[in-house]
Image (cartoon, rainbow, N blue to C red):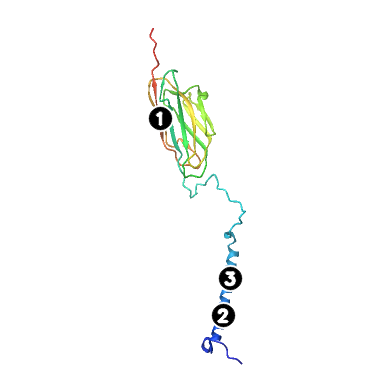
Amino acid sequence: MKPRLSWGNLTSSKEYTLIRHRLGLAALAAIALGIALSGCASGANAPAPADAPIPQQSQSRSPHSITPFWPIAVTESFNPTSLIGQGGGTSHLTITFTSNQFDPFTYTPLSFSETLPPNLIVASGQFGVLGDTCGGQVAVTGSYATIGLKNATLNPAGASCSITLLISGHMPGTYDNAIAAGAVTATNAETSNAANAYVTVLPPHIIKP
């Protein structure tokens, strides 16, 4: 009977080479088996086919989303910045809403409400709504002094929309149309900033006899 082959009784370099060859083949087989089993266990991580559809990002986020909530920026302006009172003139008030440039989510439904300063009103009430690019419903209530916007949509990534109203005044003076922080709301946005715009109501011209 031939003696059992072991490291201690290798008699030639030929036998040693044979052992190394057999051990190398066994190691390669074990590695290949491990890779195959790993691929079966994690099939979800396999690369998708080239023609697989790309999943679309949701347009709404949950309160637990890791994506930060950004505030809606609010600005406003009067044009012109002065008008003749008691029906002698009007000014256009434009209120603009802007989404954050880094936010990929749409702000909807967007809502807004404010009350004009005393002695300022929306001329002709609902007919004084001159424009709305936010796609919602603008309502003028409260003796033509309260402006409301609801069910509007503001697109993401720095997009803007605005509403424009025709404003008239009564008593002379300079008025601050102060929009409070938080006056603009959306389900997936932080509190909006405060904004201010000023308009001067001039006394009507007096025609002497």
Residue sitting at x 58%, y 77%: 25
In this figure, which residue is indicated by the disc labeled 1?
Answer: 197
Label 3 is placed on what type of residue? Answer: Ala
- Residue matched to label 3: 32
The residue at which mark 2 appears reads as: 21
**Label 3 Cα neighbours within 10 Å, binned few <14 / some 14-19 / many ≥20:** few
Give the answer, above or below, for where 168 lies relative to 98.
above
Res 12 quadrant in image: bottom right
Figure quadrant of residue 31: bottom right
Q: Residue at x 43, y 30 (%)?
A: 77
In this view, the residue farthest toward the top is 209
Foreground of the two, 140 or 205: 205
Q: In front: 154, or 186?
A: 154
Which x, y percent locates residue 85? 41, 19
Indicate which disc, 1 or 3, sits on the residue closer to the N terminus: 3
Query: Residues under labels 2 and 3: Cα distance?
Result: 17 Å
Element type at mark 2: helix
- Name the front one of labels 1 and 2: 2
Residue at image x 60%, y 61%? 43
Image coordinates for residue 10, horizontal then vertical, percent = 53, 88
- Amino acid type indicated by mark 2: His
Q: Nearer the viewer, residue 54 or 61?
A: 54
